Image (cartoon, rainbow, N blue to C red):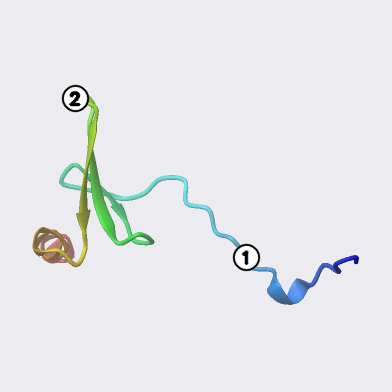
Amino acid sequence: MKLKHSTKFTQEVKMVKELPNFKGYTVDQRLKQFRKVDREKPSIDFVDFDSEEGQKLLEEMEKE
């Protein structure tokens, strides 16, 4: 069985070279997260937009 390529399902993919930053966090709109990397002790802090801390950061970001 041979599958045909259909342009009906082809999507344009927009590449982002650098995500925005706010208060030391990388802001990922697609995943709805703030992320902070601590390079001294290898760890990543994830804060979801819908968490209490995430809502606070979003409010502060909107004010700027």
Residue 41: name its quadrant: top left
Seen from this angle, which residue lies furthest right?
1
Foreground: 1 or 23? 1
Task: Give the answer, above or below, for where 24 lies relative to 60.
Answer: above
Say which residue label 1 marks: 12
The answer to which of 63 and 3 lies nearer the viewer is 3
For the residues marked 1 and 2, what is the alpha-carbon distance in whole angstroms? 38 Å
Q: Is residue 55 above or below residue 41?
A: below
Determine whether the residue tagged by mark 1 lies in a helix, strand or loop: loop
The quadrant where residue 49 appears: bottom left
- x then y, percent, for residue 44: 24, 38
In the image, taking residue 33 as reference, residue 23 lies left or right, namely left
Residue 31's disc is none
The residue tagged 2 is 41
Quadrant of res 30: bottom left
Residue 14, how many percent across, how many down? 55, 59
Q: Amino acid at mark 2?
A: Lys
Q: Three-letter amino acid code at disc 1?
A: Glu
- Residues packed near mark 1 inside 10 Å, few (<14), some (14 to 19) or many (20 plus): few
Secondary structure under tag 2 reads loop
Q: Residue at x 82, y 67 (%)?
A: 5
